[in-house]
Amino acid sequence: MTIQLNKSWLPTVFGIVGSISLYLSQLGTNLPSTAAEWGTAIFAGALGGLGLSAKQFNVTNSPIPVQPQTVNAATLPPAVPPVARPDPPLVMPPYPG
């Protein structure tokens, strides 16, 4: 996956800053040692990944320009005339009264 920072970089910055601030506010500069600390570290990593995926969701590569195709009338199939179908008869319900 190629990460492009020239387009839509704001969600990436929010995701990374949010994950770092969450990790530092909960664990400080220590490495996780208990299950709760590992859960916080994994959640902080998921928050950073969410920032990257939110950025990548909206970034599209510029499409390759499509050349207009010319149509040769000699190669087209013959036109099929429409089939004339009679209209169904109009049946009026009896007038109540």
Image (cartoon, rainbow, N blue to C red):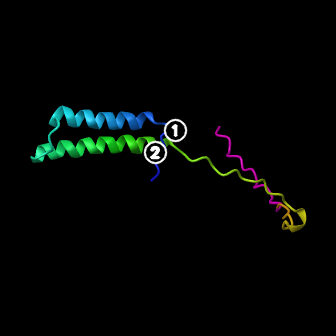
In this rendering, the answer to whether 27 lies above or below 70 is: above
Q: CA distance from mark 2 to mark 1?
A: 9 Å
What kind of element bears circle 1?
loop
Q: Which residue is mark 1?
A: 7
Q: Quadrant of residue 52?
A: top left
Q: Which residues are magenta?
A: 83-97
What kind of element bears circle 2?
helix
Identify which amino acid the numbered label 1 is placed on.
Lys
Could you tell whether 64 is left or right of 1 in the image? right
Residue 94 located within the stretch drawn in magenta: yes
Frontmost residue, 5 versus 45: 5
Q: Give the numbered dot on residue 52.
A: none
Q: Which residue is mark 2?
A: 56
- Locate residue 73, reporting x and y percent: 89, 62
Residue located at (46% from left, 47% from top)? 3
In this rendering, the answer to whether 83 lies above or below 2 is: below
